[in-house]
């Protein structure tokens, strides 16, 4: 039987991509804000409904540059450990200190009732994560940030194209960052973007991502190289034509999973809160060992035996990783810690067939 992987990158036909990159072969302009790059940036602004957005080499650099563009060079950033390590790495690599807030049990996003007790005179920003397509309690976060004069930068890597109460997710907070990694709902192979709210910030992204170079003779800061190249942008232009139908295919898979798994004892499913127009990025399940009769790890291993490759995402919890030298105590965020031991994301991608979902469900129900 064929292996079923947790994800499968969505791509255009080879012919479509060849047609898209033909001009690049004609004009020999491969990177540094080429025609494809600029076309993609303008089309994404329209698609995401924002006036200010810049493209980057990946979602990780989007996080780092979003912190840098606000001039946040020291202090504490309140964030969650139930995320991909990139969020925390970005904070640490910018010389800032992550302060971990716990998450909600039902949607895995930051528990807004616990943010204020973590604010100190050193706090400079909040970096919440929209997890699996669930959107944070943005109204409460905005109120807290306003009261305490903090910047809010959303890690929106999981929520490309989503809306909350009719408003595009890219429009939320002081800035939102996106990952266009190959495994995401929308990809440019590798890529990312920052959406923000002023021409000045947009200009500062352009300067930072290009070594700090302002013009031929002027370099104003020590910047990295984080530019998106023309081949990635061309992929992005092709994929943007298809992303709505891919999200519709994901919805079909989501609905079928829900129909089949709803009511299975000990398996909790992800239900989107009201007001969210989801992109169905992931299909997480929470395995309650006592009720299900088997641990997350046991189910994971059984799926693997049946050639079904789920993912323990996010596990281990970021605050438990060796790279942070035991600086954090994962027990301080007990909900996130428990979820990391119970969660698993099932295969989810555009085109996942009902037959494959049946195979996955059969293993879970047994
Ligand atoms: C929540 C989150 N943040 C950040 C990133 C980093 O994005 P990238 O892989 O494009 O650098 C990812 C994805 O990989 C992610 O899922």
Image: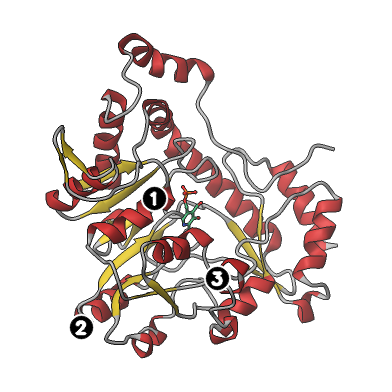
Residue 349 position, x and y percent, is 59, 44
With respect to residue 187, does 237 lie above or below? above
Beta carbon of the mark 1 residue lies under 8 A of ligand 1: yes
| Alpha carbons under labels 2 and 1: distance apart | 29 Å
289 or 63, nearer to the observer:
63
Q: Earlier in the sequence, mark 1 or mark 3?
A: 1
Q: Residue at x 34, y 38 (%)?
A: 227
Q: Specify the farthest residue to the top.
A: 26
Beta carbon of the mark 2 residue lies under 8 A of ligand 1: no
Quarter containing the N terminus: top right
Q: Earlier in the sequence, mark 3 or mark 2?
A: 2
With respect to residue 1, does 30 lie above or below? above
Q: Earlier in the sequence, mark 2 or mark 1?
A: 1
Give the residue number, with chain letter if any, for mark 1: 61
Q: Residues within 10 Å of mark 1 (few under 14, many from 20)?
A: many
Give the residue number, with chain letter if any, for mark 3: 324
Circle number at residue 147: 2
Q: Considering the numbered disc 3 on the image, is that residue within a helix, a strand or a loop?
A: helix
Q: Residues within 10 Å of mark 2 (few under 14, many from 20)?
A: few
118 or 327, nearer to the observer:
327
With respect to residue 2, does 108 lie above or below? below
Quarter containing the C terminus: bottom right
Circle number at residue 279: none
| Alpha carbons under labels 3 and 2: distance apart | 31 Å
* Residue depth check, mark 3 versus mark 2: number of the one nearer the observer: 3
Q: Quadrant of residue 117?
A: bottom left
Res 132 visible: no
Side (left or right) of 87 relative to 322:
left
With respect to residue 267, does 155 lie above or below? above
Q: Considering the numbered disc 1 on the image, is that residue within a helix, a strand or a loop?
A: helix
Residue 122 position, x and y percent, is 29, 82
Residue 25 position, x and y percent, is 38, 12
């Amino acid at each position: 039987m064929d292996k079923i992987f947790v994800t499968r990158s969505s791509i255009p036909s080879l012919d479509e991509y060849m047609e898209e990159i033909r001009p690049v072969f004609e004009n020999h302009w491969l990177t540094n804000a080429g025609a494809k790059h600029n076309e993609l940036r303008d089309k994404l602004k329209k698609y995401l409904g924002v006036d200010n957005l810049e493209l980057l080499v990946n979602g990780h650099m989007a996080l780092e540059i979003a912190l840098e563009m606000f001039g946040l060079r020291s202090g504490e950033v309140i964030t969650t450990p139930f995320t991909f390590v990139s969020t925390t790495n970005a904070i640490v690599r910018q010389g800032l200190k992550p302060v971990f807030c716990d998450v909600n049990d039902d949607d895995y996003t930051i528990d807004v009732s616990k943010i204020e007790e973590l604010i100190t005179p050193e706090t400079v920003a909040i970096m919440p994560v929209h997890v699996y397509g669930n959107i944070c309690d943005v109204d409460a976060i905005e109120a807290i940030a306003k009261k305490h004069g903090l910047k809010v930068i959303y890690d929106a890597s999981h929520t490309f194209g989503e809306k909350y109460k009719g408003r595009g997710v890219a429009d939320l907070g002081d800035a939102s960052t996106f990952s266009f990694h190959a495994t995401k709902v929308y990809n440019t192979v590798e890529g990312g973007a920052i959406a923000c709210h002023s021409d000045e910030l947009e200009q500062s992204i352009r300067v930072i991502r290009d070594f700090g170079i302002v013009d031929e003779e002027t370099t104003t800061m020590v910047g990295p190289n984080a530019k998106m190249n023309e081949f990635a942008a061309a992929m992005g232009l092709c994929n943007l034509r298809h992303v709505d139908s891919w999200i519709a295919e994901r919805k079909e898979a989501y609905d079928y999973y829900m129909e089949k798994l709803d009511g299975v004892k000990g398996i909790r499913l992800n239900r989107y809160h009201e007001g969210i127009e989801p992109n169905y990025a992931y299909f997480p399940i929470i395995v309650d060992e006592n009720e299900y009769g088997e641990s997350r790890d046991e189910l994971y291993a059984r799926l693997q035996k049946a050639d079904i490759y789920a993912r323990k995402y996010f596990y281990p919890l970021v605050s438990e990783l060796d790279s942070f030298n035991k600086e954090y105590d994962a027990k301080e965020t007990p909900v996130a810690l428990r979820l990391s031991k119970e969660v698993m994301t099932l295969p989810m991608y555009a085109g996942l067939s009902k037959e494959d979902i049946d195979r996955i469900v059969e293993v879970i129900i047994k």
